[in-house]
Image (spheres, coloured by chain):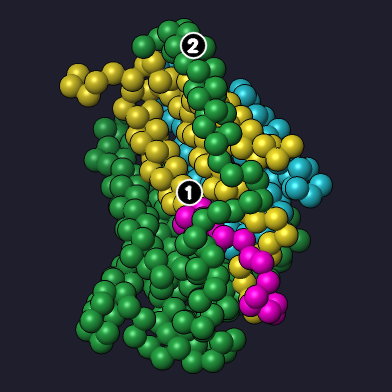
Amino acid sequence: MSFLPYAVAVWLFIVGLYGVVSSRHMVRTILSLAVVQSATYVLLLAIGYRSGGQAPIVADIPPTTTLVDPVVQVLVLTDVVIEATVTALLLALVVQAHKRFGSVDPNDLRPLRD
Amino acid sequence: MTVLQIVALVAVAAGGGAVALATDPLRQTLLLGVFGLALVFLFFAFQAPDVALSEIVVGTIGLPLIILAALRKISEQERTRQRDEDRP
Amino acid sequence: MSRRARLWLFGVAGPGLAAVLVIGFRGLPAFGHYHGVYGLVVNGVELSMRHATDYVTALNFDLRAFDTLGEEYILFASVLGVTLLLRVMREEDEEFSAAGRGLDGSSDAVRLLALVLVPLLVALGVYIVLHGALTPGGGFQGGLVLAAAPAALILAGRYLELKILAPSWAMESAEGIGAAGYALLGLGGLIFASVYFRNFLPAGNPGQLLSAGFMPLNSIAVGLEVMGAFLIVWTAFLDQALLIRRRSLEAR
């Protein structure tokens, strides 16, 4: 049972990757990429957790209580915001590709020289 | 591991599977919003309130707004192209 | 590569990848038994060193401020890419009469709710940004909430008013000031304390608003940048979806 967080991370990674590989619509590919990214969030937070630990904010608890690791939370925190912006960049690419090639199927993309 | 964490992990696994295996992009967007809420629940259960705060805003407005605007633009361009092709 | 070939390749490589991941994760410490040293050290000395009660924000904006500089510039570069890709092209027009098409039809109750939400979200966002070093919050979260405030006008079906409330020149200036301000604060550490991004303002009493050195200033810079970035991205996409049309074939 203590392997469950890691198992969920592996499951999210594999199923997200399957969504990326098997999609016929480029927007579906991008949303499955978001699932793959959330696998890393689950993994990082699972590594930093301590049994019986509290959130690393000592505004109202004595500073000597057991706290969970704050370093991994920093990594996940900035990553969540960056993911949204990079997804926006990918979606802008999809919109422009649709304007140019008339299709959102990944198989219909051609090199730009024609 | 508390029961709350186990429930949150199962919800996240189910939500992730649903998002990746959905067929229609519009349906997938709504499922992504629900998956974001499940992730928020998980982050709170793992004692990470800062992370949960940013995931709340990104998962409910940040991503779905962009995706819905992009999907609408794509369907509009489809309609314009159909109209231009049907023109004699 | 055709879709069938991709699926075959995934069918072979996927289980292999899953097996490797599971074997690798079995070597990690069991869930709940955290062995890292860095986190324990930070938890021990953070309060006495920097007088900040929120360790995550203190790590983000002080102890690991250089990483946040890199992340901020990833944000900046992505927004640059989005605005470049979604600009108005030669064969397109921006029609303001088409604005709001498809957005009207929301009821009066939703519009009233949106009107009430805008000042509430601004106040909440400013609070979260300023109290980053004390309670859960900080520049990233507060900037997102601040960006959501004009976006509530979309609920009311008024897209052009969003462009009046959050004009593009203001959002671009906010993003630029945030990004440059953060780098300049690091330079302040170089000038006044001889190390780039060393905390050079007095630490104050833990729990008060003006404490923890330059963390509130860093928070404000990042909050401005995130707010500007998200509003620029949203208006770029919504312009494409609602305002920009290709010129029809007769007019060309």
The magenta region covers A60-78
Q: Quadrant of the N terminus of chain C?
A: top left
Q: Position of residue C219 (x, y in %)?
A: 45, 74
- Is B61 situated left or right of C177 in this image? right
Q: Nearer the viewer, mark 2 or mark 1?
A: 2
Q: Colour of chain C?
A: green
Q: Amino acid at mark 2?
A: Val
Chain shaded yellow: A
Residue at the disc numbered 1: A84
Quadrant placement of the C terminus of chain C: top left
Type of the residue with mark 1:
Ala
Give the crowd class for mark 2: few <14, some 14-19, many >=20 residues within 10 Å.
Answer: few
User: Of helix, strand and loop, which one carries label 2?
Assistant: helix
Between C124 and C241, which is closer to the camera in this rendering?
A: C124
Q: Secondary structure beneath disc 1?
A: helix
Which label sits on residue C12? 2
- Letter of the chain in cyan: B
Q: Residues within 10 Å of mark 1 (few under 14, many from 20)?
A: many
Q: Is residue C73 above or below residue B81?
A: below
Q: Which chain's residue wears label 2?
A: C
Residue at x 50% of width, y 25% of height = C20
Are circles 2 and 1 on residues that touch, CB within 8 Å? Answer: no
